Amino acid sequence: MKNIITISRQFGAGGSTIGQEVANRLGYYYCDKDMIVRAALESGSLTPDEIRYYDEKVPAEFGFGQSLFDFYSKPLDERLFNAQKEAIRKVAEKGNCVIVGRNANIVLKEFDKTLHVFVSADIPFRLRRMMTKMPNVPEEKVMDRINSVDKARKRYCKHYTHTEFGNAAYYDLAVKSSTLGILSSIELICDAAKM
């Protein structure tokens, strides 16, 4: 039985919804971005404004003339990533948890009894889901949001983990919610966790 499940997901693919229901069905603790950020904040090394500003952002100047001194002085967003990483590890050490986002699959790669899942979906499915969550936003703006969040997640993953977001090599299971449906995706993950 896998007692730590991480879920990475494309924006709008239903990863959070799937993660919450997997946690409910297995009787596991559910942990998402808000809980991880709250735990990072409680560590006391960062202010709420700092966390809001740098959350899931890669420094714009990174790779464009950033000096070695600046790199090794650990900019604020590096401190935020490390605080989140520690929060993820603390949750995982207790076991029986589903952790959504934050590159938890890489942060916890050396942990035993883990199941690392990637949830994807095709664009029309994602657009339909997000249009229901953002009903007063024009379709073009919703599509822009999908693209910008996906791009930010890829950059964040590459910068902090030196891995490729969505690459099958970093996951045990990939589900496509637009093909399988949300409920079948949940059942598949629960079944895989019981192996």
Image (cartoon, rainbow, N blue to C red):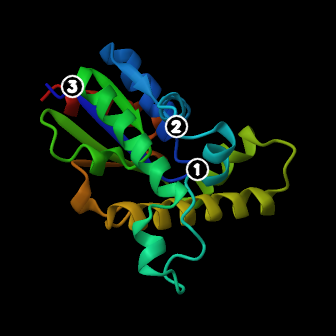
SS state under label 3? loop
Say which mark, if any, is on residue 33.
Answer: 2
Q: Secondary structure at mark 2?
A: helix
- Mark toward the start of the polypeptide (1 vs 3): 3
**Which residue position is annotated with label 3?**
3
Q: Position of residue 173 (x, y in %)?
A: 25, 47
Q: Is residue 79 left or right of residue 48?
A: left
**Depth check, front residue: 194 or 97:** 97
The CA distance from mark 2 to mark 1 is 10 Å
**Dot 1 amino acid type:** Asp
| Residue beneath disc 1 | 55
* Residue 179 in sight from this viewpoint: no
Image quarter (top left, top right, bottom left or bottom right) of the N terminus = top left
Q: Residue at x 51, y 76 (%)?
A: 62
Instruction: State which mark lies toward you, 2 or 1.
Output: 1
Nearer to us of marks 3 and 2 is 2
Question: Is residue 74 in view?
Answer: yes
Residue drawn at 68 percent across, 46 percent down: 130
Q: Is residue 99 left or right of residue 191?
A: right
Q: Type of residue at label 2?
A: Lys
Q: Residue at x 37, y 25 (%)?
A: 22
